Each structure stands twice: as structure tokens, then as C-alpha cells.
Amino acid sequence: MNFISKNLKNFGLILALVIFASACGKNGGGDLEAGSNIAEQGGEETAPETGPGAQAPVADNCVPTSCETQGKNCGEISDGCGGTLACGECAGNLSCGGAGTENVCGAIRTCYRFGFVSDREFNAENVFLADTCAQAQPRRLTRNHEEGVRFNHLAFKPDGSRLGFEKSFAGVDEFPIPLLSSIPLAANSLTSLEEVGSGDLGEFADDVYSPQFVAFEPNGNRIVAVANTEELNGLGPNSQVVKLQRAKLFDPAQGNAREILDLDLVTNRRFSALLWHPDRNRLIFSRNAPVGDPRLIQVYFINENRTVTVVENNGNGSLLGELLEGSQPAMAPVGNLLAFVRRVAGRSQIFTCHLDAPRIGAFARQSCSQVRQITSQASNTRPAWTPDGQFLLFNSNRDGNPEIYQMKADGSEPLRLTENEGVRDEDPAVHPTSFTLTQN
């Protein structure tokens, strides 16, 4: 091969390689340009992303909201941009939307009004009205400024229109003065209160003198009270005037007050409580006893044979029980739970028992089974049931000061309702109707 032929052959090979490389460069450039064009067109030719990590498309310029901005604290809500927000869960007894607002924790809380005695103003006792939800400051119903005055035995009428109580004087041997204070009809109102101090209860006949321990018949019109009277005991120079207590039942339909119980005060046996059973056929009472003699809870049958029987504790199911020792009885408005107070290790504690159906016959019997102690901390007295029978209000000094507390019927979840250092808040009486409050 000569020199020229050899060089032409090499030149042709080089030219072929250049042409091939140029073709490849054009094809690659076309692909890149096409890819750039797809990207500029919003990726319409790109396969959509799928799987658990996929997110909903976000609208142009959309700013997602938040649970806090919307005032929500539970459940799921829209973020306003096509997504959802988890706002959390509700704690305790609250439920999501429970108070009527969607995605907001809440509940309908039941509140109870109650009367109580306190020396929080003027260092003198007065009667106050408050509520367990603390919707308003306690309202004073009396205008006492004397330190020696005492108020006792608070009781509401069945319609809640009036609160009865007694006014007495410390160290003065006189019968207590019964009073009535009017209560506004609105269940959750603490205004427009008027004190009524007539010196009598109005509904009683004239033969009832200075009634005490007034008890209004549940859902009825009859009234039971203890009539304090004085009688001459003995004859001649050895005679003396003694004070007597007689429980009387006044029935407006008959227009008179008949005597039903008579306690002999010569032996220092006095009433310490008197109340109606919800069936309105029985009266429950306790009495003070001489030193060393235990206080006993008793029942008087009104409509059967008008007998009195000492309540027995038949917790073991036997027919022979032990006498139910205790005082300050309080009968639940619904159900058959009886609350009472008994001394344990030198302190007063609250107990409950199931007041069984009575046995009426030649020997009337009344038993209370399943006796249970429901308080143990410090001293606890004066149990008072809420109208639904779910809670008890009571006195306690467990925090170092006499205050009023609330607890469930089994003694759980105690809640302090009053808080006033250096003063006494005590002797609660619960209004017969409740009201509700939205709680968030």
C-alpha cells in the first residue's frame, strides 16, 4: 500500500467516528431538552407518587390552620388545605364534644345549692346559701351580729322555696326560735333573698309551741317537728318545772297537730335529729343519751301501727342483729342508703347502711344491713344527701379548719367546697333541686 492510500483510509475512519459521535450528541441533547420541557409543564408526564408516605396536593399559597387557632382540643379537624389535624384526647370524665361544642373537651356538670352556718362575717354565726360549683359568692341569709347566737337544724321545704332553721342563744336556757328564709325560685340564682323571722313556722296549729327539728315531708305537705314545752313535775314543795320534748305531726288537710312521740327529758333523753323516710311512711330519729349510754337510731312507723323500733344491724343475715349505734341520720332521697355518724377511736366518722324493707306485725322491726364506714381522716359529721343520692355533703376538719366537703356515696373523691382559715363553715343542708353547668 502506498503512502497516499494509507492516509486516505485513516482519514475516512476518523471522519466516520466524528459523524457517529455527532449523531449521539444530538440524540442525548434531545432527551435532556424533552425532560426539561416536561418539568416546565408541571410534571404532567410524571407518574403520580403512591404509598403510605404520599401527601395530598397543597393548593397554591395555602397556609394550614392549627387546633389552637380554631379553639379545638380533641378529635380531628381539617387544616384548611386538604389535610387533617389531630387535636388530642380528653382527660378525666370529659368527652370530646361533651358540652355541646364539636372538637372541644367538656361535660355537663351537675351543681347543688346548699345552706350552711358560718361565722365568716362579724365573728358571729349566720346562715349562708352557696352552690357546689362556686358560681357565686355565698349569700348571707341572716343579719346577725351577736357572737352568742347559734343557728341549727337547717331544712329546705320540698319545693325549695324556703329554708327553715333555729336561732338560739349560747348559755341561755331558752327554747330556740324557729325561722324561715325565702329562697328564689330560679334554681341557679342567689339573689332576691328575703329573711323571714316571724318566730313561728306559720303552717303549724296554735298548739305547737316553739317547734324544733322541723322536717318537711318529701313531696308532701305534712310537717314533723319537736314541740318544746314546760310542765310541772311532782306535787307540793318538791315539784319542779321540767322541759319536755314531744314530736308532733301536723297535717294541713286535718288542720291539727297530733302528738306521735314523747321523750322523757328527766332522764336527759332528747331528740338529736328527726327526718322523713322517702316513702313518707316512716320517721327516722336519734336521741341524745345519758353519759355512757350510746346513741341509737330509731324508726317510727306512721301509717301502720304507729310503733317505735330500734334499728338493728343485720349485716350477717341473721334474724338477731345488734342495735344500730349512731346519730345524725340522713336518708338518701332515692334508694335505701342511710348515712349516720358514729364515734371511732375518739373521732366522729360517717357510715352508711342499706335500710331494709320493714317487717310490720306484732313486733315491728327495722334492720339496716351492709354497714360501711366511708370516712376515716380526722373528724367528719353532719352528712347531707344531694337530691339525686349521688353525693354527700358533710363537715370535716381534715385540713385543720372546720369546712364543708363533698364526696361520692361510697366515700370516694372528697372535694373541699369552702375554704376560710380561722372561721367555721358547717352544718350543710342541700336544696331539693339541682342545676347544670357546662364545663370545658
Image (cartoon, rainbow, N blue to C red):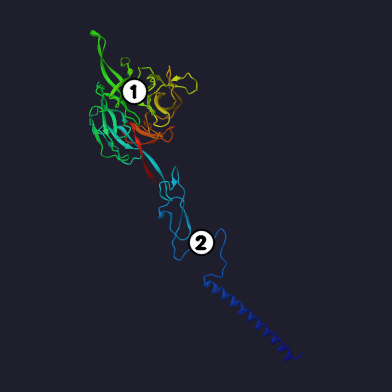
Mark 2: amino acid = Ala
Q: Indicate the position of residue 286 as horizontal and vertical percent values.
A: 36, 22
Residue shown at 57% from the left, 60% from the top: 51
Mark 1 and mark 2: Cα distance apart in space:
75 Å
Across and down, in percent, residue 183 comes to 28, 36
Tag 1: amino acid: Ser
Instruction: Tell which residue pokes out farthest to the top in this image.
Output: 236
Q: Is residue 212 above or below residue 109?
A: above
Q: Regarding mark 1 in the picture, which secondary structure is present there?
A: strand
Q: Are marks 1 and 2 in contact (CB under 8 Å)?
A: no
Asked if 44 appears above or below 25 in the picture, the reply is above
Q: How many marks?
A: 2
Quarter of the rendering containing residue 387: top left
Specify few, some or many for label 2: CA neighbours under 10 Å numbering under 14, 14-19, or 20 or more: few
The residue that appears at 47% across and 48% down in the rendered structure is 89
Q: Which mark is residue 133?
A: none
In the figure, residue 241 lies in which quadrant? top left
Residue 374 locus on image (x, y percent): 43, 30
Query: On the rendered structure, is 39 left or right of 301?
Result: right
Q: Earlier in the sequence, mark 1 or mark 2?
A: 2
Name the foreground residue: 3 vs 352. 352
In the displayed image of the protein, which residue is found farthest to the front? Answer: 253
Which of 341 and 304 lies nearest the eye of the viewer? 304
Q: Which residue is mark 1?
A: 272
Decide if residue 125 is in sight here. no
Which one is nearer the viewer's eye here, 31 or 78?
78
Q: In this orientation, does residue 107 appear?
A: yes
Residue 354: horizontal and vertical position, in percent? 44, 27
Circle 2 sits in a helix, a strand or a loop, which is it? loop
**Residue behind mark 2:** 56
